[in-house]
Image: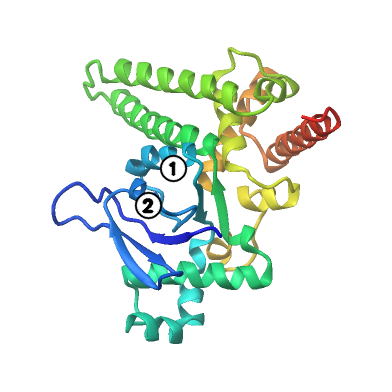
Amino acid sequence: MSRRIFIDTKWNPKKNNNSKKHVCYDPEKDVFIEVDSLTELKDYDEIYLDSSLFPNMWKQLRELVSNGRKVYYFAKPWKWREIRQRFKEELKTRTGKVSKTDNGDAYLLWKVYELSLVKNNTHKYFKPLIIVDVELRPLLMKEELLYKNLQRVQNASMVGVDVGSDAKVLEKMVEDVRREIIDKATRLIPRFIDIAKNLGLDIDDVNGLIGLAGLLVYIKSASYQKSVKYLGLYKAKGRDAWKIKKYSRRAQRHLIMLTNTILWKNGECRPPRYRDLRKILKTIIESRKQIRFAERGAGV
């Protein structure tokens, strides 16, 4: 029988003596425990995290996944208020409080998991982290951060600020991390180069390859419609549309990078429209399906 643990993660718990630890709930023993590092959870087969995946956690997650642990993260953080309301009586009985607490959040993760088992929809609430995620997500986050810093320095230079050699240093850092992403994507993502060629990309289309790598990492669903919603490729209506429309801005950035590259290669120097983004997305979804079908037919 698999041992499971549910974790309310904390940012950089080892930074100083007053830093908070990761708070964990073990439903089998009905106890809360605290750990500095996720790698301390060696006795558990399945590890369920909340939606906060902090930069200092990726090395730990890589070790867990490499050692055969199954790791999942909570994929619907916007439902926390609804979840807290639904389980408020159980939460008060177990922790003594209905308001947000570290113990309470870890306990609520388990309650969500327990209910999702009954409804047979665990996959909607908890997404797996695999080796592709733990290797590429931190690099994609690093690339985005470096590129934003580069843009800020370049903008400062354009208005007369002396930025010295900062721009060149950042340009080199962005170039290096992008090459590292492409190298790892080629090794870790099945048929990455085949999908790129199907989109008309070649090895020199660095921006396009980064966009493709990001999309293939972040998009888990094989459904075109679900991916459209995840990427926000629709127009929400009404006065409160901005509140209702929830999507991954990080994943959308990578789709825009990829689509821009393809448009420019085709001689279309203009911002991508929704229909352009949806067309590229559909091509990727179809390419994935064809590759999986071919692999099954070949017995891979």
- The answer to whether the residues at label 2 and label 1 have Cβ atoms under 8 Å apart is yes
Judged from the image, the secondary structure of the residue bearing numbered disc 1 is helix
Q: Which mark is residue 281?
A: none
**In the foreground, 257 or 81:** 81
| Residue that appears at 59% across and 17% down | 205
Q: Amino acid at mark 2?
A: Leu
Estimate how packed mark 1 is, as few (under 14), some (14 to 19) or many (20 or more) residues with alpha carbons within 10 Å: many
In the image: residue 275, left or right of residue 151? right
Q: Image quadrant for the C terminus?
A: top right
**In the foreground, 7 or 143:** 7
Residue 247 visible (yes or no): no
To which residue does mark 2 refer? 41
**In the foreground, 204 or 195:** 195
| Residue that appears at 69% across and 24% down | 191
Q: Which mark is residue 64?
A: 1
Judged from the image, the secondary structure of the residue bearing numbered disc 2 is loop
Q: Amino acid at mark 1?
A: Leu
Residue 210, position in %: x, y? Answer: 54, 26
| Residue that appears at 19% across and 55% down | 19
Extreme-front residue of the structure: 1
Compared with residue 141, is residue 79 higher up or lower down, i.e. above or below? below
Extreme-right residue of the structure: 297
Compared with residue 191, is residue 289 higher up or lower down, i.e. above or below? below
Compared with residue 83, is residue 163 higher up or lower down, i.e. above or below? above
